[in-house]
Image (cartoon, grey):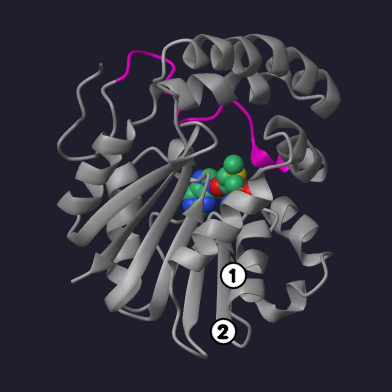
Amino acid sequence: MAAVDETTGRRNLESGNPADPPFSFADVADRYDTLNRLMSLGRDRRWRRIAAAALNLPAGGRALDVGAGSGDMALALLRRWPGSGVTGIEPEADMMRVGQRKPNAGQVRWTQGDGLHLPFPDGHFDGVVSAFLLRNVPDVAGALAEQHRVARPGGRVACLEMTWPQTPGFRELFRFYFARLAPPIMGILSGQPAAYRYLPRSVQRFLTPEELKAVMERVGLHNVHYRTLMMGTVALHVGERG
Ligand SMILES: C[S@@+](CC[C@H](N)C(=O)[O-])C[C@H]1O[C@@H](n2cnc3c(N)ncnc32)[C@H](O)[C@@H]1O
């Protein structure tokens, strides 16, 4: 297992750091949702529902979705917590444009920006969530430190992310599906083969759930715990600002 860099929270990776995607999400924006449904066998919406519930927002609370992409996580928050104020921050305008066409997207406050430098004051949000973001940032600890900073004391920070399953037998089956079978098919369907070659590599090399928990604790989050979903292929971490 690769060692985790104390400062950045990243694994010490050789060349080809998967946290530096060899494509832009803008290039896959139009087909992103469809391919998500296919890759996850239709389960990704359920995972976001669970992550939305985990934020435990107060009535009329404020939530932030970091790396909002095409908005499915932000919209899941609005469905779970009607009346809340949901902000989605995302660097790629093309991803946001896909989200802005969805029903109820007008209720999301869309902000173009970087999750490593959140343009919000300390303690501004009652809850902060990211879905499938952290594998794609070059500084996991930095992103989490920002999420911690903008959460109010007692507010929750939740991270939904893919993780490589550990159960012998299933692990090999998953490798076959996720690293062998799906990438060429998704590459053809998306027209972006590099994006779908990157996907399994980025999951395989990302922090384990225990390592991610340790990074969340190191940036100051309390009561950090996690659960895995879909037979250990997805992890939901939740912590609180102290
Ligand atoms: C795999 S997509 C996930 C999108 C969405 N959260 C979802 O649940 O489908 C990752 C998103 O993170 C965005 N992203 C990458 N680097 C980022 C950064 N430094 N700050 C904020 N978002 C970033 C990408 O542009 C992309 O839209």
Position of the C terminus by quadrant? bottom left
Badge 1 vs badge 2, beta-carbon distance below 8 Å:
yes
Amino acid at circle 2: Ser
Q: Which residue is mark 1?
A: 77
- Front residue of this view, candidates 43 and 95: 43
Indicate whether 19 appears above or below 125.
above
- Occupied quadrant, residue 8: top left
Amino acid at circle 1: Leu
Judge whether residue 21 is colored magenta: yes
Is 62 left, or right, of 75 in this rendering?
A: left
Is 221 left, or right, of 77 in this rendering?
A: left
Q: Estimate the x, y position of residue 75 in percent, counting from the top left.
A: 67, 67
Sequence-first disc among 1 and 2? 1
Indicate whether 34 appears above or below 146.
above
> Which residue is depicted at the point 60% across and 60% down?
49
Indicate whether 236 appears above or below 40.
below
Q: Which residue is mark 2?
A: 84
Q: Which residues are magenta?
A: 13-26
Instruction: Considering the whole magenta stretch, tell me its main secondary structure.
Output: loop
Position of the N terminus by quadrant? top left
Is 75 left, or right, of 162 in this rendering?
A: right
> Which residue is depicted at the point 44% across and 56% down?
115
> Callout 1: 10 Å neighbours few (<14), some, many (20+)?
many
Q: Is mark 1 within 8 Å of ligand 1?
A: no
Judge whether residue 162 is colored magenta: no
Q: Secondary structure at mark 2?
A: loop
User: Residue 69 got which mark?
Assistant: none
> Which residue is depicted at the point 60% across and 14% down?
179
